[in-house]
Amino acid sequence: MKMVVQRVKEARVTVDGQVIGSIGTGFLVLAGTTSEDTEEIVDKMVDKMCKLRIFPDSQGKTNLSLKDVGGELLVVSQFTLYGDCKKGNRPSFIKAGSPDKAKKLYERAVDRCRLYADKVEQGMFGADMKVSLINDGPFTIVLDSEELF
């Protein structure tokens, strides 16, 4: 599983011109899975992501977690995180999880996020989404289960 975690002042996702999810201060998370991922991996990744201490404290040091600042989450599925560009100029998405399994793992991740934040919004799995954000910092972290566990 891969997650691109962006600390944001605000973020929203629209489908067909309609806002389907929006947040204030928190994380915009782009999440992708492979066929190798499991519910256990999803749980560990969400726990790691939500416990990241990347918000500034009163001295300006990145020392506070999402929960510490009452942050919100917007989680968007993105299979293109597993695009392989090694050969040619057209990415291959063979490593991305099958849609059925990926959707279940994505929904599990969103549900798990609710343990850490009062407001958890999400994109629409498989839809053509437009995502906008105001990145805070900018501050972006990439989490990859193959490197963490």
Image (spheres, grey):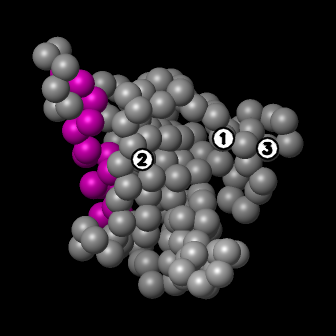
Q: Could you say where residue 60 lies in the image, as x and y percent from the top left? A: 19, 20
| Quadrant of image for the N terminus | bottom left
Local crowd at mark 2 within 10 Å, few (<14), some, or many (≥20)?
many
Look at the image and say whether residue 54 sits in the magenta stretch.
yes
Q: Marks 1 and 2, how far apart in space? A: 14 Å
| Quadrant of image for the C terminus | bottom left
Label 2 close to label 3 by CB (< 8 Å): no
Q: Could you say where residue 85 lies in the image, as x and y percent from the top left? A: 57, 75
Q: In the rendered view, does 113 fall on the left or right side of 61? A: right
Q: Which badge, 3 or 1, comes first in the chain's sequence?
A: 3
Q: Marks 2 and 3, how far apart in space? A: 21 Å
Q: Give the image quarter of residue 71.
A: top left
Q: Amino acid at mark 2?
A: Val
Can residue 76 be seen here? Answer: yes
Instruction: Judge by depth and name the residue closer to the eye, 68 or 140.
Output: 140
Residue at 39% x, 43% y is: 140
Q: Marks 3 and 1, how far apart in space? A: 9 Å
Quickly name the residue at label 2: 5
Q: Residue furthest right?
A: 16
Residue at 27% x, 55% y is: 48
Quickly name the residue at label 1: 131
Q: Amino acid at mark 3?
A: Val
In this rendering, is residue 98 above or below 47? below
Q: Could you say where residue 141 lies in the image, as x and y percent from the top left? A: 35, 48
Q: Amino acid at mark 1?
A: Val
Quickly name the residue at label 3: 15
Q: Which badge, 2 or 3, comes first in the chain's sequence?
A: 2
Local crowd at mark 3 within 10 Å, few (<14), some, or many (≥20)?
some
Specify the segment rendered in magenta: 43-57
Q: Could you say where residue 107 lies in the image, as x and y percent from the top left? A: 55, 60
